[in-house]
Image (cartoon, helix red, strand yellow):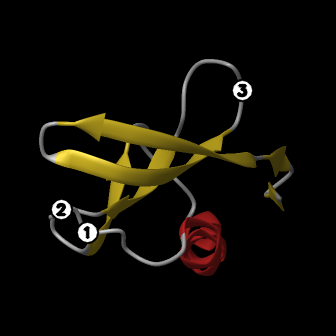
Amino acid sequence: MVVHGVEYWFCCASSVVEGHDGLAMECWRDNNGPLFEIFRNDETLRFEVTLFAENVPLELLEYAVPIAREWLGDFVPYP
């Protein structure tokens, strides 16, 4: 996706550490780390957004949310 002339890309990553069991979609602009992640938390059964950078364009977040819901799928609660 290109916003204001800057190219961004997305990838998925899983995470299983205490309090953070689920699947995340990360947004990257360069190789310096993700700008933000949208996380499907299978412990709390909630989607969460974590920003790792300042001044993330709102258009980028609005674009990413429906994609994350599709890519990350349904919650997988653990017994």
Residue beneath label 1, please? 77
Sequence-first disc among 2 and 1:
2
Mark 2 residue type: Glu
**Pointer 2 with pointer 3, Cβ within 8 A:** no
| Residue 18 locus on image (x, y percent) | 13, 37
Relative depth, front residue between 36 and 16? 16
Question: How busy is the neighbourhood of tag 1: few (under 14 within 10 Å), some, or many (20 plus)?
Answer: few
**Pointer 2 with pointer 1, Cβ within 8 A:** yes
The correct choice, above or below, for 41 with respect to 34 in the image is below
Q: Cα distance, mark 2 to mark 3?
A: 31 Å
Residue beneath label 3, please? 30
Q: Quarter of the image for the C terminus: give it.
A: bottom left
Picture quadrant where residue 69 is located = bottom right
Q: Cα distance, mark 3 to mark 1?
A: 33 Å
Residue 40 left/right relative to 11: left
**Local secondary structure at mark 1:** loop
Mark 1 residue type: Pro
